[in-house]
């Protein structure tokens, strides 16, 4: 995957409990913010490193 934002959203999506329905007192925005705050800095760094390596491979015409 070349798009780091898609990777980030996948991680955020996995941090949510899909079984838990949105409560009347919470918003979708608060649910997303809460999940995003659970993503570790190390995980973000790994996403960036992976994307950087994939971009380099593309520039050098290696298979991705």
Image (tube, rainbow, N blue to C red):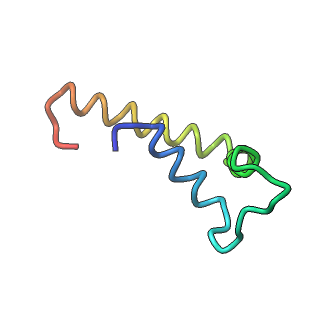
- In the displayed orientation, state which residue is furthest to the left: 61
Q: Write the residue at 66% across / 61% down.
A: 16
Residue 54's x, y, as percent? 31, 36
Is residue 12 left or right of 4 when viewed as pictured? right
Q: Write the residue at 52% across / 42% down.
A: 46
Q: Write the residue at 76% across / 46% down.
A: 30
Is residue 25 left or right of 60 when viewed as pictured? right
- In the displayed orientation, state which residue is furthest to the top: 59
Q: Nearer the viewer, residue 18 or 54?
A: 18
Residue 36's x, y, as percent? 68, 45
Q: Quadrant of residue 50?
A: top left
Quarter of the rendering occupied by the N terminus? top left
Q: Is residue 38 above or below residue 45?
A: below
Quarter of the rendering occupied by the C terminus? top left
Q: Nearer the viewer, residue 33 or 58?
A: 33
Q: Nearer the viewer, residue 21 or 53?
A: 21
């Amino acid at each position: 995957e070349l798009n780091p934002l898609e990777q980030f959203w996948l991680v955020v999506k996995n941090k949510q409990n899909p079984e838990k329905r949105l409560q009347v007192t919470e918003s979708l925005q608060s649910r997303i913010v809460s999940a995003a705050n659970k993503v570790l800095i190390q995980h973000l760094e790994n996403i960036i490193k992976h994307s950087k390596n994939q971009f380099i491979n593309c520039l050098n015409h290696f298979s991705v």
